[in-house]
Amino acid sequence: MSVPFQGASLRVIGQEDFVAMKVFAGGPQDMSDAANAISIAGQSLDVALVKRLARVMGAMPWENLHKLMAIEGFTRCLGNCAN
C-alpha cells in the first residue's frame, strides 16, 4: 500500500502483516517489536488475520505468536483461541 508523505509516495504494510512478519523472524527484537505493535494497535488489530498469517507461515511463527499472546496477556481472541 502507498500513502502520500511530504509530497512523495511512501510504501507501507498493514499492522497485521507487520506482526506476522515479526513472529516469523522470531528474534528477541522482532518479538519485542511485535509486542509493541500489538499494544499500540489495540482494538484495531485484526487478530483473526494475524493468526491466519502466522499459521500459513508455519509451525514456528504460529508458536511464537501464541507465546507472545500469553506473555503479553493478549487474550482478545476471535473464535477458538487454540486455532
Image: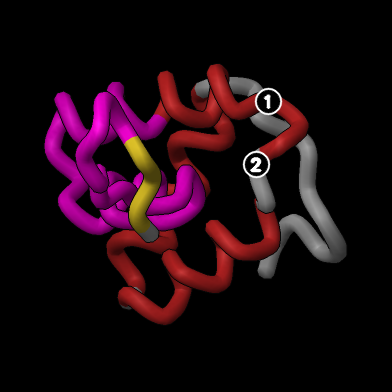
**Residue occupying the far right of the picture:** 79
**Residue occupying the far front of the picture:** 7
- Residue closest to the eye, 27 or 34: 34
Q: Secondary structure at mark 2?
A: loop
| Picture coordinates of residue 19, whole percent (x, y) | 40, 45
What residue is pinned by disc 1?
Answer: 42
What residue is pinned by disc 2?
Answer: 45
Main SS, magenta residues: helix
Q: What is the crowding at mark 1: few (fewer than 14 residues within 10 Å), some, or many (at least 20)?
A: few
Q: What is the crowding at mark 2: few (fewer than 14 residues within 10 Å), some, or many (at least 20)?
A: some
Apparent side of residue 82 relative to residue 8 in the rendered image (left or right): right
Residue 75 inside the magenta-drawn segment = no
Above or below, comparing residue 49 to residue 35 in the picture: below
The residue under label 1 is which amino acid type?
Gly
Above or below, comparing residue 9 to residue 21 in the picture: above
- Which label is found at residue 16? none
Q: Where does the magenta region start and end?
A: 5-34
Apparent side of residue 80 relative to residue 36 in the rendered image (left or right): right
Residue pictured at 50% horizontal, 51% vertical = 16
**In which quarter of the view is residue 57 placed?**
bottom left
Residue pictured at 66% horizontal, 29% vertical = 74
| Picture coordinates of residue 60, whole percent (x, y) | 29, 63
Residue pictured at 76% horizontal, 31% vertical = 43
Q: Is residue 64 visible?
A: no
Quadrant position of the N terminus in the picture: bottom left
Residue 28 inside the magenta-drawn segment = yes
**In which quarter of the view is residue 61 placed?**
bottom left
Q: Is residue 14 visible?
A: yes
